Amino acid sequence: MAIYNIFPDKDAFIWSQSPIQNTGRDEILEISTFNDPATIDNLNLIPSVTRALVKFSQNQINYALDDLVDVAGGGVYTASLNLFLANASKLPQNYTLECYAVSESWTMGTGRLADIPITTNGTSWTYAGSSESNNAWQTSSFQANVTASDNGIQRGGGNWFINPHSSQSFNYTSDKDTNFNVTPIVTAWYSHSVYGTSPEAFGNEGFIVKYTDSQEFNPDYIQQLSFFSMDTHTIYPPQLQIRWNDSVYNNGGGTVISTVSQSIVTVGNNQSEIQDTEVYRFRIFCRDQFPTRSFQTSSVYLNNKFLPSSSYWALKDLNTEEMVIDFDSNNTKISADPTSNYFDVYMNGLEPERYYQIMIKTIIGSQTLVFENPGDYFKIVR
């Protein structure tokens, strides 16, 4: 598999209107800006902004880049931060979110937004740690390449490296899930962790996701985005997704199918249940739907052929019918050896106790066909 998902070590969102409240165990990561002057004045409130924090294990990142991608050996990868939308309200037709690398260590805490009284034992708008420890976010005298922003009333809101960073723009019709390209940030974390060469001591303290400065604390913007957190009871926790091309095509001179419309493609070694710790190699078997008769001792229906190198795999959640891993012309290419076509899946990068449908796409000239056999599905078990 050339797609590996890492799940968070910790996450939370911080809120200017409740500056010492912790939300480390909330099921939601909220990113919002709510600054309508009339509402704020009538309720005697301060401007309201929320920002999301999420961190992934550096050990897991190093494992992916060292052992899977093999960066030292020349392996090339991309990394994306994926947050999945739970709810949205009052969105404008166009808006932009920004993603930066946090520059200061923070504590997740055990709070939820609905806690009464509020929980203060972890990060908040004012504090990187608990309010009891008086570990406030730095708001001035930053080191090079570090900044922060707040409304000048409630100081805090986290701090972050200015570069590298990522942004993503959305319009009225676009998918509201995030897919930040954070490859430069992950590369900087990896280089610092492994080689210690970064001049800004660019250590992994996670990501901060926020609206742009022009939208935050701006009375013309009133909008709210709620994403699922690592404590969600759904299958949509945040993901740091590593992608690379691991395909190797060497079919030993075997016959490649010449037409997709008259071919049968199946996963020959599929298991009904696969452990969540396995790296499983799925073998794809292909034959003509109407094989030519020949003189041989075995059935002509056992004559295995090969899909062309322009073939790809995908996984779909069998229950929700959502694409968990979509076809990708660079990173889900199907490999081949003299036995058959194949692809590898790292099961610990998928949600356990779910059923996944295997899908195969192959392209020959102007022909494209997607194979989705009803029996080609599996369940990941703990």
Image (cartoon, rainbow, N blue to C red):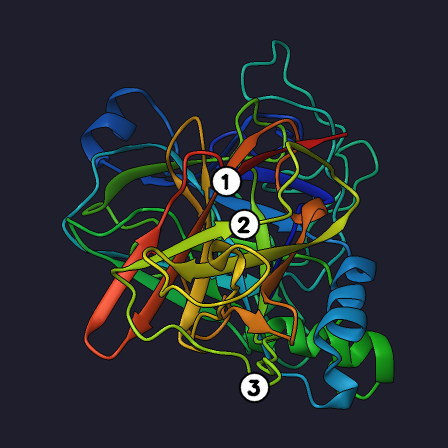
Q: Nearer the viewer, residue 279 or 217?
A: 279
Residue 326 shows in this picture:
no
Q: Which residue is mark 3?
A: 253
The disc label shown at residue 276, or none: none
Image coords of residue 196 (percent x, y): 85, 83
- For marks 1 and 3, give the CA distance: 27 Å
Query: Splitting the image into 4 quarters, where does residue 361 fall?
Result: bottom left
Q: CA distance from mark 3 to mark 2?
A: 21 Å
Q: Which residue is mark 1?
A: 376
Which residue type carries mark 2?
A: Val
Name the residue: 64% across, 47% down.
Answer: 269
Q: Say whether disc 1 or disc 2 marks the residue closer to the N-terminus.
A: 2
Q: Which residue is mark 2?
A: 267
Q: CA distance from mark 1 to mark 2?
A: 6 Å
In terms of image quadrants, where is residue 328?
Answer: bottom left
Point out residue 295 in the picture as x, y percentages from the top left corner.
49, 67
Q: Quadrant of the C terminus?
A: top right
- Residue at position x 29%, y 29% from top? 40
From the viewer's perspective, tell me whether residue 332 is left or right of residue 198: left
